[in-house]
Image (cartoon, helix red, strand yellow):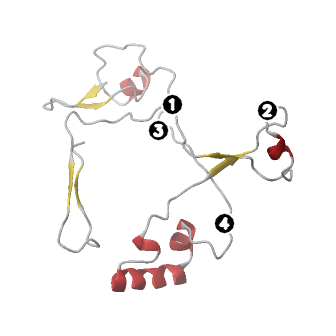
Amino acid sequence: MVIIAGSPQKCCEGVSFADFLVKANFDIIANFEVSRSDIDHHYAVVEYEAKPFVDSYWQLTSNDTREAIESQRYAAHGDGLFGNVVGDTLGMIRLPNDVASEFQKQLPADRPAAGCIHLLCRTLHKWQPETPGSIELASADYRDTLLIYTNY
């Protein structure tokens, strides 16, 4: 656990090993075997290849023409790629035939059989505030950037 002097809040827990913190000139008060096997900044990545006509985050980050078009659509009407969630991901797997149903066995070999609707990882939250933050509207226009008070 890392605590910042002058703050009653716990800033992080189980984020690193003691030797790393010592090298960064942190004083170690106690070294417990908590979260010892966890990975720092663990996250899962799902990648897929989308057809050119499928709206995706890539089109906003790698296609300057499409980004300009979508920026204009959003400014004018509040819709388009910037007006919805473009970060959706879909993970699919192919079950081995010895556990698959008869229907799944009949699918082409390159066809996934099971959709992963939820993805869980071992370390869900390493950083947590002691009290909740808040989100407020900056104005009556929902397109204006929200005021986010994370309390981290």
Mark 2: which secondary structure?
A: loop
Residue under numbered circle 3: 41
Query: Closer to the camera, 18 or 61?
Result: 61
Q: Of label 3 and label 1, which has the lower sequence position?
A: 3
Label 4 near label 3: C-beta < 8 Å?
no
Amino acid type indicated by mark 2: Val
Residue under numbered circle 2: 99
Q: Quadrant of residue 13?
A: top left
Residue under numbered circle 1: 122
- Residue 23 at x, y = what percent? 39, 27
How far separated are the C-alphas under marks 3 and 1? 11 Å
How far separated are the C-alphas under marks 2 and 1? 25 Å
Mark 3: which secondary structure?
A: loop
Q: Residue at x 29, y 73 (%)?
A: 143
Query: Closer to the camera, 110 or 123?
Result: 110
Q: Of label 2 and label 4, which has the lower sequence position?
A: 4
Q: Of label 2 and label 3, which has the lower sequence position?
A: 3
Residue under numbered circle 4: 50
